Amino acid sequence: MRFQKNYLVAVSGVMMLVVSFVLSAPRTTKATSSISQAEVADTSDDLSIDASLGDTQVALKRKHRRPSGTLIVIQIIAVLIARPSDNGGPPMTDLNATITGADAVQGSLLYALAWLAGYPDPLRSVRALGYDIDVSEEHDRPCTDGPPSELCQERARRLATLLDATLALGSPDERLQFRQGASALGVAPDCSAAATTGDSPVLRAASPDRPADLLIDAAIGDRQIVLTRKGGGSRVEYMDIRLKDVIITTVQPGHPDHSDGVDLNVRITGADMIPGSLLYALAWLAGQPDPLGSVRALGYDIAVANPHVHSCSNQLSSHTCEDAARNLATLMDATLALGDPAERARFRQDASLIGVAPDCIVPEP
């Protein structure tokens, strides 16, 4: 992933070990989904998500290999919980494991959730849902050495929310099946945030000296979205927003599939640059004719330096631009879940007002 923080432990490579035996535990009937795992296994792509807000980061990779069957390498590269301490590295939870079996594609993500939540036997938890997988762990540093805690389960829910948002870039069937499996494990994606009206006291009182930098780097197959929001200057007097590598595969009648990419790099200033910067990126990606006007109409005091004149709508159909913006809003929403609930709730409200609400639906029990 592109933007690893300097204090993260580097992962030198992917360790792959093919497990040549299958445990004889009987396979149970799946009650969680009408979609068979075989239907999504052959179309599932490599997946990566790296999201951070301030000092909190979650990063995961799923690598799909098919040497003579289904083999998945899953890496929870980092789950940072707080700022690094002065006398040591940051508290971190990480995992490197190889998943094999007929259901390794979906089962790998569910195993990562169960492991991060601190379940005593994450493999058994996933198999109990009817997933045929085996696991070989190369390295693990668990959330807790004791019984599972609410804190560990909350971290797993944050990861589930980010994975759900990333899967929105790919197959709807795979995303639905993941939601159902995560819900059955007890760590369903968090698709709820308290609604707010009027001004958010958290946002309006936020000090411009310490705004939280934000990073999103999500990819599934050849579809990717990368966004960074960074404050600049000795005193943070502006926010730099960079939206790049928005790759959207489109299909046109009579033409082969092709990929179009769009990118944006602007500087946002003004009293409301912290929340307004994210909203501007959404309005611009959606192809709105006056993205700055759309954000100012919500009451945000921002200005934009060096705006790009060529928008998404110049390269893609407006419908595709709106879809891309909604995917970005969903990823932003999942990343903001790592921080203050009031900021996330305000973002949801405003994104909806400019017509690109996050796509997040509570899964059925």
Image (cartoon, grey):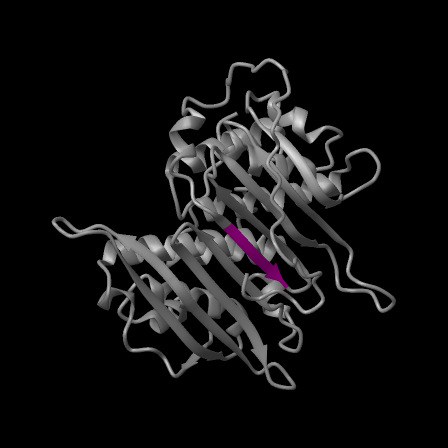
- Report whether residue 292 is seen: yes
What secondary structure prevails in the magenta region? strand
- Quarter of the picture holding the N terminus: bottom right
Name above or below for residue 181 compared with residue 349: above
Which residue is situated farthest in the left direction here? 254
Answer with the quarter of the image where residue 325 lies: bottom left
Is 49 within the magenta? yes
Name above or below for residue 75 compared with residue 32: below
Q: Position of residue 329 (x, y in %)?
A: 44, 55
Residue range highlighted in magenta: 48-53
Is 345 within the magenta? no
Residue at image position (62%, 32%) is 19
Q: Position of residue 296 (x, y in %)?
A: 40, 71
Q: Nearer the viewer, residue 224 or 266?
A: 224
Residue at image position (52%, 46%) is 63
Q: Nearer the viewer, residue 56 or 74?
A: 74
- Report whether residue 348 is seen: no
Which residue is situated farthest in the bottom direction here? 234
State left or right for residue 84 relative to residue 257.
right
Count up the numbered dots.
Answer: 0
Residue at image position (49%, 48%) is 47
Q: Nearer the viewer, residue 61 or 162?
A: 61
State left or right for residue 195 relative to residue 158.
left
Q: Position of residue 282 (x, y in %)?
A: 39, 63
Q: Position of residue 262 (x, y in %)?
A: 33, 67
Name above or below for residue 130 compared with residue 8: above
Answer with the quarter of the image where residue 119 lies: top right
Q: Nearer the viewer, residue 23 or 10?
A: 23
Residue at image position (33%, 78%) is 308
